[in-house]
Image (cartoon, rainbow, N blue to C red):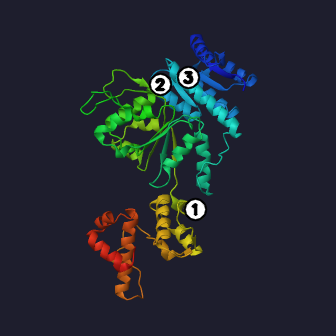
Amino acid sequence: MSKAHALVVDDEMDIIELVEITLARMDISCQGAGNLAEAKRLLATEAFHLCLTDMRLPDGNGIELVRYISDTQPDLPVAMMTAHGSMDTAVAAMKAGAFDFVPKPVDLNILRRLVEAALRLRASDQQLGETPSTPGHTGLLGDSAQIRELRRLVAKLARTQAPVFISGESGTGKELAARLIHGLGPRGSRDFVPVNCGAIPHDLVESEMFGHKKGSFTGAVSDKQGLFQAAEGGTLFLDEVADLPLSVQVKLLRAIQEKSVRPVGAPHEVPVDARIISASHKDLNALVSAGDFRRDLFYRINVIEIRMPPLRERPEDVPLLVDHILGRIAHNGGRRPQLTTSAIKALQRHPFPGNVRELENILERAVALSEAATIGVEDLYLCQSDAPPPAESLPMSEQPLEEFLGEVEKQAILKALDETRWNRTAAAKRLGMTLRSLRYRLDKLGIE
C-alpha cells in the first residue's frame, strides 16, 4: 500500500506545520494550501487520501471546499477545523458532506483519531470495491421504495462521523439502522454501545453516561467508566434520547461540542472519541416547543435525520419479512410452516401498530399454536385496532350470542397475551382479572 497523502488547507502556516509534524509521525505526507484556489488546483493535480480545511479562507470558506470535494471526489474524506465554540460551523460542514470536524486549538489526540478513522474508511472502500453511491447488502429487508432509499442513506451516512437522529415508531428497527451505520463505517471494528435513556434512573444518568470518581457520592466505592468512555473509538447509540433529564442534556451537548466529558467528581475533562447516533419515537420538535428538550442539543444530534417507515406504509415488503422471520424461527428449533395466500394478504392489510416487532410476535404465536403445515388467517388472531370497537360497531353475526361473545373474549385475551409476550400474570392484570380467572378462561377457550 502506498504512503497516505493529506491536503491541509489553512491560511496560517503554523497550523499547517503543526498538522504536518503530527501526521509525519503517523507516516503520512502532507501538502499545504493557503487558500481555496490553491486547494482546488492541488486536488486537480495530486491524489490525496484525506483533506483537512479551515473554515475561514482568504478567498472563500471551508464549506465551499467541502461541497466541491463532495461533488468532484466523493471518495475523499474531508474534515473541518473549526474555531473553539463554533459548533454551528461544524454542523453546517457535516450537513454539506464533511466526514468530521476537529475544534481549534487542535487537540492532537483527537486529530490522530480522526485521521485514523478517515484512512480506515478509504481502506474499507477499496476492500469492498464499492463507491459511496453503492448501498451494498445492509441487512434492511424489503424492496419498497422507502427501504431502497433507506439502504442508500445508511451506506452514505456510514462514510461520515456526523451525528445522526433516527425517528420512527416503536418496532420499526431504529437500533438495526444504527448498528448498520456503525458496522458499515470506519468504526465497524470498534464497540457499538446501545443505551436506553429511559431505562436509567434519573439520579444515575449522569454517572452512567459520563462515569464517576471514587468517593464522589454515596455508593461510589470505586472509579467507574461511563458509557462515552466505553464507546471509545466506536459508536454510542442513545435510544429514546428524549427521556434524558434536562440537566444531563446540558452535559451531553458539551460532550458533543468539545469531544470530552467530565466524570462526576473529576477535576478535569477527559477527551472521548465516540460517534453519537440517537433515536426516539417521540416528536422532538414538539418537545423542544414545550421546553422539555433543549433546542441547541436538538440541532446538534439532528445533523442528519433518518425516518424509519412504519410497516403499514410498505405492505409489499410483508412477504419477504414473513419468509425471513419464519426461517429464523425454524433455525431456532421451531417448525417452518407456510402461510396461505389469504393469510399473507391479511397481514398486508393489517395496520401493525407495533410494526415489525408485532409481525414477529404474530408469527411466533401462530407457529407455536398451530400444528398444521399451513397457517391461515384464523391462525394469526389479527386484531384490527388497539382498542375494542364500540358495541354498536361490532359486526353482525349469525352465530348464537354465547358463541359470538366467546370469540370476542378469545380475541381480547389473545391480544393481551401477545402484548405481554405471553406473560399470564401481566395479561391478567391488563384484562382486569385474577390470574386464576384467566387460567380458567384459557382452559375453557382451548388456548394453550
Q: Which residue is mark 2?
A: 86
Q: Which residue is mark 3?
A: 112
Give the x, y percent position of residue 25. 60, 16
| Real-space CA distance between mark 3 and mark 2, rounded to the nearest whole angstrom | 21 Å
Q: Residue furthest front?
A: 333
Point out the frontmost of discs 3 and 2.
3
- Total marks in image: 3
Label at residue 327: 1
- Which residue is drawn at the image coordinates 69% and 32% (left, top)? 73
| Real-space CA distance between mark 2 and mark 1, rounded to the nearest whole angstrom | 51 Å
Q: Is residue 431 left or right of residue 345?
A: left
- Which residue is drawn at the image coordinates 65% and 16% (left, top)? 32
Quadrant of the rendering where the C terminus is positioned: bottom left
Label at residue 416: none
Q: Is residue 55 left or right of residue 242?
A: right
Of the numbered discs 3 and 2, the one sitting upstream in the chain is 2
Point out the frontmost of discs 1 and 3.
1
The type of residue carrying mark 2 is: Ser
Instruction: Specify whether residue 386 is in view.
Output: no
Give the x, y percent position of residue 408. 37, 77
Disc 2 is placed on an element classified as loop
- Which residue is drawn at the image coordinates 51% and 29% (left, top)? 90
Q: Nearer the viewer, residue 195 or 257?
A: 195
Category of crowding for the residue at label 1, using alpha-carbon neighbours closer than 10 angstroms: few (below 14), some (14–19), many (at least 20) = some
- Which residue is drawn at the image coordinates 59% and 65% (left, top)? 319
| Real-space CA distance between mark 1 and mark 3, rounded to the nearest whole angstrom | 45 Å
Category of crowding for the residue at label 3, using alpha-carbon neighbours closer than 10 angstroms: few (below 14), some (14–19), many (at least 20) = some
